[in-house]
Image: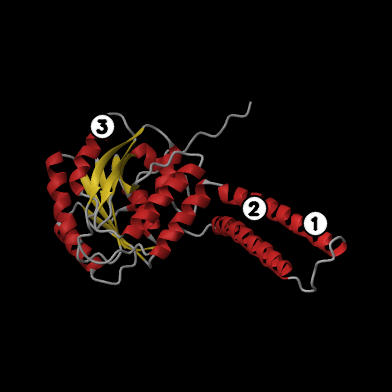
């Protein structure tokens, strides 16, 4: 298998047929052995029925049906786990990312790169608020992480089998795949494109899910929030000390004070707020540690037409030699 195309699906009945036709129109001329892997992530519409129709007419179409909705990043992970291609493309089903870019991505991969990601020049059909928050997130993440995560990129990219095998060795529960791929390293490059409007349906990425993804990215690749909580604690302690000194000065020197002084309440509320923020940040990290310690499976497959014996196993690193 030369090429695997991974497509996570969540309520995309209005886009599946158009996506399939566009994929076939660009992949067939490439003269490669390929497979399409559709991952049904607990869709509540006719998405799974349409995927079954495709599998009945095209043997190159594979599918994975989850037992429930596990999330976009987990759906992509399942596709990577079961993909057989020497190269793997990740693309969403909403047709905002053009399938016509895949041959160029594949050609670039043949030049010796292990990762070729698609970088957005423009984003059509999205609100100013979403564009601003996305732009802000990518730049904040790039500034606080110790690895170089490219800005203005999503999961639309092509990766080699070497990178896929490396991803299989990263079993953390809170997935941020574009960050993991950057962490892996190897030779990486990009191609620019203009992102189109969503072809149909409603986006599954609500602001709540976007915030969760942002938290996964930040907590998975940066300890800056913990450092900020520590620094904030020192600053608040310093302010509290100054307030204490001023209170003693007003009480014993100037005699200018009143019982139940309002600034005391302000300082208490201020310190309490900072403490709660710090506890919340620490709690986010502890929650992720707890999720990984439980070692539950990332996903549960209800049905699939992929023969598991065809799935390539990752190349595990050699154990260190003890002399």
User: Which residue is tagged 2?
Assistant: 232
Q: Earlier in the sequence, mark 1 or mark 2?
A: 2
Q: Is 208 placed left or right of 201 in the picture?
A: right
- Residue 256, percent from left and from top: 81, 66
Q: Quadrant of the N terminus?
A: top left
Quadrant of the image occupied by residue 101:
top left
Q: Earlier in the sequence, mark 2 or mark 3?
A: 3
- Residue 57, percent from left and from top: 14, 59
Task: Mark yes or no: residue 314 visible.
Answer: no
Q: Quadrant of the C terminus?
A: top right
Viewer-nearest of labels 3 and 1? 1
User: Which residue is tagged 3?
Assistant: 110
Q: Secondary structure at mark 1?
A: helix
Cβ atoms under marks 3 and 1 closer than 8 Å: no
Height in image: 238 above or below 164?
A: below
- Residue 258, percent from left and from top: 79, 72
Badge 1: few (under 14), some or many (20 or more) residues near its Cα, within 10 Å?
Answer: few
């Amino acid at each position: 298998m030369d090429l695997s195309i991974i497509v996570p699906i969540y309520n995309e009945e209005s886009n599946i047929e158009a996506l399939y036709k566009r994929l076939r129109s660009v992949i067939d001329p490439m003269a490669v052995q390929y497979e399409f892997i559709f991952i049904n992530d607990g869709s509540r519409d006719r998405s799974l029925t349409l995927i079954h129709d495709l599998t009945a007419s095209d043997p190159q179409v594979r599918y994975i049906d989850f037992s429930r909705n596990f999330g976009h990043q987990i759906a992509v992970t399942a596709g990577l786990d079961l993909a057989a291609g020497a190269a793997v493309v990740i693309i969403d089903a909403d047709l905002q990312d053009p399938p016509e870019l895949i041959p160029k991505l594949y050609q670039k991969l043949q030049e010796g790169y292990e990762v070729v990601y698609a970088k957005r020049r423009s984003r059509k059909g999205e609100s100013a608020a979403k564009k601003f928050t996305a732009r802000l997130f990518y730049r904040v993440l790039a500034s606080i992480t110790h690895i170089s995560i490219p800005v203005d990129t999503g999961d639309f990219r092509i990766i080699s089998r070497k990178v896929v095998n490396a991803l299989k060795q990263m079993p953390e529960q809170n997935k941020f795949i574009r960050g993991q791929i950057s962490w892996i390293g190897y030779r990486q490059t990009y191609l620019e494109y203009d992102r189109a409007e969503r072809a149909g349906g409603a986006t599954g990425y609500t602001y709540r899910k976007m915030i969760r993804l942002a938290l996964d990215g930040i907590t998975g690749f940066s300890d800056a929030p913990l450092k900020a909580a520590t620094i904030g604690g020192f600053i608040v302690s310093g302010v509290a000390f100054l307030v204490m000194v001023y209170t003693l000065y007003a009480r014993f020197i100037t005699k200018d004070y009143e019982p139940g002084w309002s600034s005391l309440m302000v300082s208490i509320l201020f310190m309490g707020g900072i403490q709660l923020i710090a506890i919340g940040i620490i709690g986010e990290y502890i929650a992720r540690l707890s999720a990984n310690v439980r070692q539950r499976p990332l996903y549960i497959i209800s049905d699939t037409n992929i023969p598991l014996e065809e799935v390539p196993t990752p190349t595990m690193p050699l154990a260190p030699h003890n002399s």
